[in-house]
Image (tube, rainbow, N blue to C red):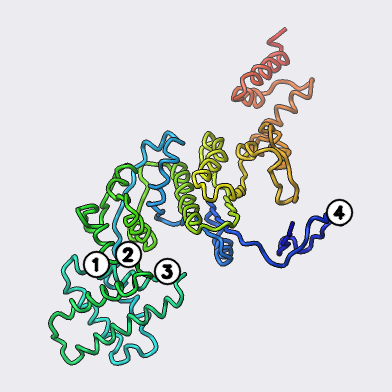
Amino acid sequence: MLLYKGQPLGRWTISPSSTAVRLTKKGPQADAIFYSTSPFETRRRASIAKSGVHDVSPPFGQDLYFDGFALLDSYRHIEDKAPFMQDLRISVRVKLPSIDSMIQRIMSYSEGGRVSTFESRTVRLQLRTWLTEMDQIALETTLLNLLLITSVPRNIPRGDDLVRYFVDRLTNLLNSISDSPEYEGAERKFGQLCVDFVADFPTIFPITGEQLWRFLRGENRIPSNKGRVDLYGTPSEIAAAISSETDKDWIVAKTLARLDLLEFRVKNLSSGETAFLMLYAALATALANLEERNNANPVFLLLDEGEMFLHPSWQRQYITNVLEFVSKFPKIAARTHVFISTHSLIVAADAPPNTLFDVRAGELRNGFGLGPSAVLSDVYHVERFAGTKAASLIDQLIEYLKNPAARSTDEVRELADVLADHELQRYVLQELDRRSGAIA
């Protein structure tokens, strides 16, 4: 067996009896997914993203967006996990790129003298003129093609050079009409240039702007509503409207998700219910992407307090639901290792035998079969369940009961009257009455 110590184990040594273990300087090939519910992990998330970890944590801000296609695809696995799913509604809004944003994208690639014949302001004005002169269908299609061209995936070698090549061809078009400002049909030539460029590189652009437009607008699938919500309904209704029944439709849907052209929002759910939904939508996206890689790498699923915001009854099902959900991805399920960090007594108590690791102490612990008080003391090293405020009041009762000569006081009786434990309350009240002489 080979052991890669890495930075965390850099100072550790191997016992002489561990003859079956050999050190290696080559790190293992592995994939990792990280999900955190904490809004205070910005720096750590940036760090792990640089190391190649797939960070699928939800964004924290005024608006909460998610991969709606992943949710629709995974919904059948989670719709029976919680009763609130019947109340779930999803709104969808088409987010076509604006004219200004596309002009800015094009101009960002025009450095190095590629449009030196014209001033930047002149080029921007000409592009704006062409785009605004197009009819609505031509405009939306051209904007989608421009978005495809300026959003070449990062894994495409020399993707930036491809975009600059488009800028070169655009510059040639600008040059061809520089002496004829009133050149008729220039906007059509510009639109056709975008169409032809995408068609010239089918391996890089398997989906065209026209196909994206037909998916979004064709046959009134998602009618335009002037920036407001375009679709609203249950997950099944949304899935029926945004059908992905063919392989080609699925590629289009994935392209829409990558380009962030559809904005999905959750409706009718509480913050805890939304947290539940966000977790599984994020995991669905990440696990599906790893299945597509079709490699043999181990997968590490790292969940940082994913149960936060969940009702205690859902926390009881948290580990079971996560493991069952991972099993829905058979290509990687057997090689997926789940690591959960938690401060929840329920989640810690639900961990399988000998799987709790105390990070601070660096020790493996067993919480299997422990009750709440035992989990609190043995796992979290907290001796009392009551908080300091309640504990200080309870201590007053304890001190009274420990002192046989203590007399009943109004303060002690008031505390006894509000005890939630009825058996304890009955006992304390009887003791108060006995000491006050009400009971012979």
Helix, strand or loop under label 3: loop
**3D distance between C-alphas at marks 2 and 1:** 12 Å
Tag shown at residue 223: none
| Mark 3, residue position | 153
* Mark positioned earlier in the residue sequence (2 or 3): 3
Kind of residue sitting beneath label 1: Thr
Q: Position of residue 85 (x, y in %)?
A: 40, 38
Kind of residue sitting beneath label 4: Ser
Horizontal side of 294 relative to 146 (left or right) equals: right
* Mark positioned earlier in the residue sequence (2 or 1): 1
Look at the numbered discs 4 and 2 and tell me whether their residues touch, using CB distance below 8 Å.
no
* Mark positioned earlier in the residue sequence (1 or 3): 1
Q: Position of residue 261 (x, y in %)?
A: 33, 60
Helix, strand or loop under label 2: loop
**3D distance between C-alphas at marks 1 and 3:** 20 Å
Tag shown at residue 207: 2
The 10 Å Cα crowd at callout 3, few under 14, some 14 to 19, many 20 or more, is some
Quick check: can you spot residue 359? yes
